[in-house]
Image (cartoon, rainbow, N blue to C red):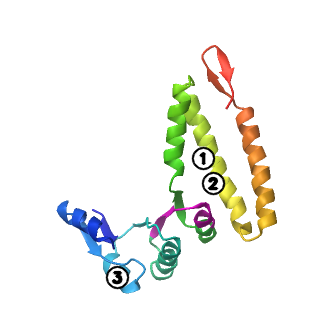
Amino acid sequence: MPTVLEINSDHVDFLRQIDLKFYYADATRLHLLEAAVTADAQLFVVAIDNEDQSMEIVETCRKHFPNLELMVRACSRDHAYRLEETGVCYFIEQLDSSLKCAVDVLEKLGHKRDHAEDAAARFRKHEFELIKEMAPHRDDAERHKGVAKRRIRDLDSLLDNAPLPTGDKERWI
């Protein structure tokens, strides 16, 4: 059963209504984390909107709970770069929902769903590779632009060389 740390009073009311164990707490405060993170905790999910506070929680958890696995929501590309540099597992807030939408759109345009899903998976992989490569250069604007331009060409090539079949003809995206 999960334990939730929540600072938003509206969310706390809902958690109370559904009988979920929670702490009305600011997860950036160590003593509150210590109260919530039990010895048998295996995973801590950080899903807050404030990127600096998110990073603070990551740093605190890594220092005080080194065996606790973290999964962190990246709110922006820069946040993803910062998370990549820490080595924690992260997910990009809008990426998966955007890819699901893209798959549905491609299917409505006549592409086979499995091919659309393959294209989305290739794009997702490319995106995470891009973040990994660009993270060390996030403060070097020229290098960052160069890597970004090259990776966009790589993505174009990836999609051009693996077109999505549709019906009797092939259709490029």
Query: Mark 1 — residue?
Result: 124
Tell me the SS state at disc 3: helix
Q: Distance between the residues labelled 3 and 1?
A: 35 Å
The reply to whether the C-beta atoms of the residues labelled 2 and 1 are less than 8 Å apart is yes
Q: How far apart are marks 3 and 2 (CA)?
A: 33 Å
Please name whichever residue, 43 or 134, is drawn nearer the observer in this view of the structure: 134
* Numbered range of the magenta stretch: 69-81
- Specify the amino acid type for callout 2: Phe
Nearer-N-terminus badge (3/2): 3
The quarter of the image holding the C terminus is top right
- Specify the amino acid type for callout 1: Arg
Q: Measured from the top left, where is residue 69 in percent x and y?
A: 46, 67
- Specify the amino acid type for callout 3: Leu
Q: Measured from the top left, where is residue 13 in percent x and y?
A: 22, 66
Q: Is residue 59 left or right of residue 44?
A: right
Query: Mark 2 — residue?
Result: 128
How crowded pointer 3 is (Cα within 10 Å; few <14, some 14-19, many 20+) is rated as some
Q: In this view, does 117 lie above or below 89?
A: above
